[in-house]
């Protein structure tokens, strides 16, 4: 009993280093985020994209080749965030169908408050005709009929952009959920993440100590690699498919 009384006396003394702090009184001193430089576009909601492109009355719907080059290599134009906040970028080539556009639009609509958030498309509506023959038909007899329309995307292309008076942790789960359900590989990014990725890529190129890079090997045709590599490897040095 005397030992317990001694311990309680020490804990209640003003020189004790063990102090109890009520949890209800603890408050965060972090400053609120500053959204003074956020500029909202004229349209803040994702619009419904048409399933079939609208042609003038005198123009008939045309058929095209596969044109796989529209999905190969890096995107050279739409690869930056216009509002410098958040978005989803493709990390590989693919085609977006109409149901992918609707999935993105409905997911954003159900999980985001449009009173303080905006979202914009960075890819056009489906325009490339994809043909397909009916099940069980013989090959030949010309090209098949148009089955659906799609939008080809390349690696690095921004698919949607999200911004407004919102922080990244509030929309991160929604963007990552959309990225996982797309037909091409994609990832949710912020402007800071994209800057860090570009910085790391430049740093690796500068600090690389291995002289046998893919660019050096292909340009010098080492071991006769030009006989078996793809023509796209000669263009992008094995960086893109």
Image: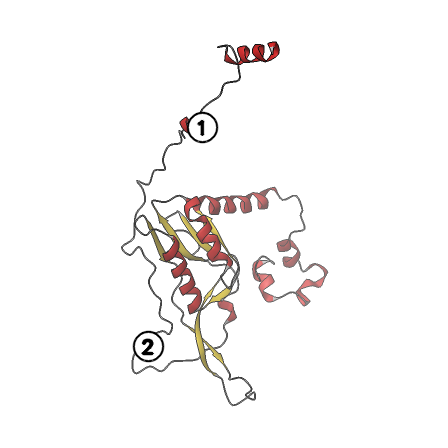
Q: In the rendered image, is residue 141 in sight?
A: yes
135 to the left or right of 53: right
Q: How is the image coloured?
A: secondary structure
Q: Position of residue 139 (x, y in %)?
A: 56, 87
Q: For the C terminus, give its image quadrant.
A: bottom right
- Count of numbered marks: 2
Q: Which residue is mark 2?
A: 55
Give the residue displayed 40% in from the left and 80% down from the top: 62
Image quadrant in which you'd find residue 229: bottom right
Neighbor class of circle 2 (other Cα within 10 Å; few <14, some 14-19, many 20+) is few
Give the residue displayed 33% in from the left and 62% down from the top: 47
Give the residue displayed 55% in from the left and 47% down from the top: 201
Q: Position of residue 207 (x, y in %)?
A: 60, 42
Q: Secondary structure at mark 2?
A: loop
Check the image and report above or below for 241 versus 197.
below
Front-most of 219 and 79? 79
6 to the left or right of 49: right
Q: Which residue is mark 1?
A: 23
Check the image and report above or below for 45 versus 9.
below
Image quadrant in which you'd find residue 237: bottom right
Give the residue displayed 60% in from the left and 12% down from the top: 1
Front-most of 27 and 92? 27
Tell me the distance, in whole angstroms, between the alpha carbons under discs 1 and 2: 65 Å
Q: Secondary structure at mark 1?
A: helix
């Amino acid at each position: 009993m005397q030992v317990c009384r001694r311990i309680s006396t020490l804990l209640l003394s003003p020189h004790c280093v063990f102090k109890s702090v009520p949890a209800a009184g603890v408050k965060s001193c972090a400053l609120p985020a500053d959204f003074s430089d956020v500029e909202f576009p004229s349209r803040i909601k994702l619009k419904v994209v048409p399933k079939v492109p609208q042609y003038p009355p005198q123009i008939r719907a045309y058929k095209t080749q596969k044109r796989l080059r529209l999905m190969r290599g890096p995107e050279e134009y739409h690869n930056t965030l216009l509002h410098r906040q958040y978005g989803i970028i493709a990390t590989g080539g693919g085609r977006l169908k109409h149901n992918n556009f609707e999935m993105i639009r409905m997911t954003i609509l159900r999980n985001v408050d449009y009173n303080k958030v905006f979202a914009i498309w960075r890819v056009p509506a489906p325009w490339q005709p994809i043909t397909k023959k009916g099940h069980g038909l013989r090959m030949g007899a010309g090209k098949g009929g148009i089955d659906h329309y799609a939008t080809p995307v390349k690696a690095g292309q921004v698919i949607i952009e999200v911004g407004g008076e919102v922080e990244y942790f509030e929309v991160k789960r929604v963007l990552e959920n959309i990225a996982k359900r797309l037909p091409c590989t994609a990832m949710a990014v912020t402007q800071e993440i994209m800057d860090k990725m570009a910085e790391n890529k430049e740093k690796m190129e500068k600090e690389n100590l291995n002289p046998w890079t893919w660019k050096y090997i292909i340009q010098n045709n080492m071991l006769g690699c030009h006989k078996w590599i793809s023509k796209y490897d000669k263009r992008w040095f094995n960086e893109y498919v």
